[in-house]
Amino acid sequence: MSVRFVAVTEAALASVQLDPAGAYAMSAGRLWSFAAALLGLAGAAVGGLALARSAGRIGNGTGRKGAFVAVAAGLAGAVVGGVVVAAAEGGPGTGYGIVGGVVAVVVGLIAMALGGLALARSRREAAAGGKRR
């Protein structure tokens, strides 16, 4: 009798367990982590441009708005990526988007760092009167 109960229990568990998502399937977690990574990447690109503009190589030190955009986009990407990682119930390959979430956090932090450097450089140049040494 116990053998039959074990067989029924195993069959019930097998029917309830979820299969991992396919390699090319786009789940909600993967979609959110992809969007967060794109947001962070856009922030990093804008931060790099703002850093170049604040150095005076492109334009005349007008990278302050871009620096704010880079910090905001990097922060948003890192936060959304962190939420995806925190909400993931499985590891890589399960469809929860944990790998993309980690990438989004890293790229978002890079974007915030570039934007912060551009802000610091533009403040330093504004304090010096816009004159380059």
Image: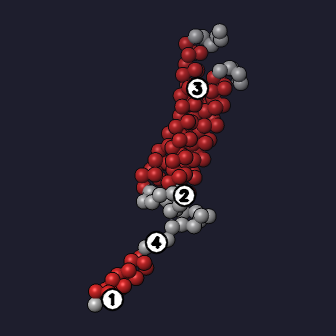
Residue located at (62% from left, 41% from top): 42
Q: Earlier in the sequence, mark 2 or mark 3?
A: 2
Q: Position of residue 12 (x, y in %)?
A: 38, 81
**Crowd around label 2: few <14 · some 14–19 · many ≥20 (10 Å):** many
Q: Is residue 75 left or right of residue 8?
A: right
**Residue 72 visible from this viewpoint:** no
- Amino acid type at mark 3: Ala
Find residue 123 and report its image quarter. top right
Residue topped by disc 1: 4
Residue topped by disc 2: 30
Mark 4 vs mark 3: in front: 4
Mark 1 vs mark 3: in front: 1
Residue topped by disc 3: 118
- Amino acid type at mark 2: Arg
Label 1 – label 3 distance at C-alpha: 69 Å
The reply to whether the C-beta atoms of the residues labelled 1 and 4 are less than 8 Å apart is no
Q: Position of residue 107 (x, y in %)?
A: 56, 41
